[in-house]
Image (spheres, rainbow, N blue to C red):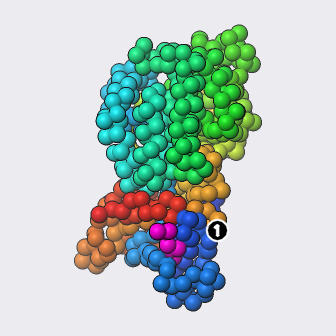
Amino acid sequence: MAAPNKLFLGSFVHSKKLKEIESLHNAAVAVDSSGKIVAVEKDCSEGRARETVLPRLGWREDEVEVVRAADGQFFFPGFIDTHIHASQYPNVGIFGESTLLDWLKKYTFPLEASLADSTKARQVYTRVIRKTLSHGTTCAAYYATIDVPSTNLLADLCHTAGQRALVGRICMNQNSPDKYRDASVESAIADTRANIEHIRSIDPSMALVRPIITPRFAPACSVDLMRQLGALAKETGLPIQTHISENTAEIAFVGELFPPSVTGAADDTYAAVYDACGLLTERTILGHAVHLTDSEAELVARRKAKISHCPCSNSALTSGAAPVRRQFLDRGIACGLGTDMSGGYSPSVLEAARQAALVSRQVVLSGTVDGKREDGAALSVDEVLYLATRGGAEVVGLADKVGAFEVGMDWDVQLIGLNIVGEDGEVINGDGDGGDVDVFGWESWPNQVAKWVYNGDDRNTKKVWVKGRLVHERR
């Protein structure tokens, strides 16, 4: 049976642009059976919607599903997680005293290698998909493992669950455990092609799940492997994801491994290495970019590559604080947010948004980063929510499809519920399970949204839709 057309009624909050959140109240949004928004009506009661919107669309009332936001609830675009390691989810919160390179050896590589066990992989991937959906993540750019069947399984599970995803088989052939690396450049390319073909077989139009070329990071890949992955991305038109300039020791290692005499690059900077290998493109997602030099940032901007800012893991692994405004936003570089589990400790993009705001304030307090003044570095609530939605959508190549309530976009949306507190101090709306976000009645809408950003969690995420399909409901 075809999905019904839907009419959503109530309050809608979304980003108009980087520094502007728009709130629509007493509004109606019509979503057709394919999950696409076909009408957005401001100041539109249910009665008016039935009398004018449905007839205009040629919809019969008895064939339309009506979804109403209750008191204390509003619709908000789904979050986009632009950098997340699905295979690392069991290690969330476990990083000990490690910095990046030690953490990879001690915690990460052993766990990822163990997911060649299909039973364990299914257990982990099923849970991470359910968990991220429960936090409102409607699209995730996933790193899997080097194992083809395990990576294919992740794609299958995303497709079945209805979560929009970019799924990448990790490629690495050096500076990693002997038993957890690609045997050769040729096998790495062949296995990546196998993963691409599998995803095309389950989602030929790639409307929900797409493959993404995934060199882990420069230290783990030979120049030949990176060049061939760059060529594969050009051949297929597929996106690329990798890490860059996360940690100062890692950056120094890249300089040692890849002098210009080896890569043919203009210099030995991290960005130049990727550029020389054909990996710095307008479809590239660069995770972290904490310590980019000005010349690297300018190169990234020229190539129109994108940045995934991962504030939680950058703090947890003591990697540093990325100067997001100066290096990315002021240069017009598209930037989204990543949870980077398990370097990051939370599956929540909302947590990443508030950490982005807090870390930006630490950048201000530091006075300078790499000798540059950072007085204007602080990110507002409006800005971090933009990064979590429309910014992330641009990073993953979906800027025209998701991230806002506009005609022609897909209904990738979450229903957010807050506690309304009565005069006796008790919650008077819904199930009373709005977590720590209490609204007393005198807060403006911008302040209610700010309270959600700084106090919210998955208890506030009541329902989640992807392409109009209900994929999560809090019970």
In the rendered image, residue 227 lying in the magenta stretch gets the answer no
In this rendering, the answer to whether 47 lies above or below 419 is below
Q: Which residues are magenta?
A: 1-11
Specify whether 427 is left or right of 381: left
Q: Residue at x 36, y 30 (%)?
A: 115
Q: Residue at x 66, y 56 (%)?
A: 400
Q: In terms of secondary structure, where does tag 1 sit? A: loop
Specify whether 278 is left or right of 142: right
Specify whether 300 is left or right of 225: right
Q: Which residue is mark 1?
A: 407
Q: Position of residue 425 (x, y in %)?
A: 26, 73
Could one spot residue 371 in this view of the protein? no
Q: Quadrant of residue 294?
A: top right
Q: Quadrant of residue 389?
A: bottom right
Q: Residue furthest top?
A: 261
In this rendering, the answer to whether 70 lies above or below 367 is below
Q: Position of residue 123 (x, y in %)?
A: 31, 40
Q: Position of residue 402 (x, y in %)?
A: 58, 57
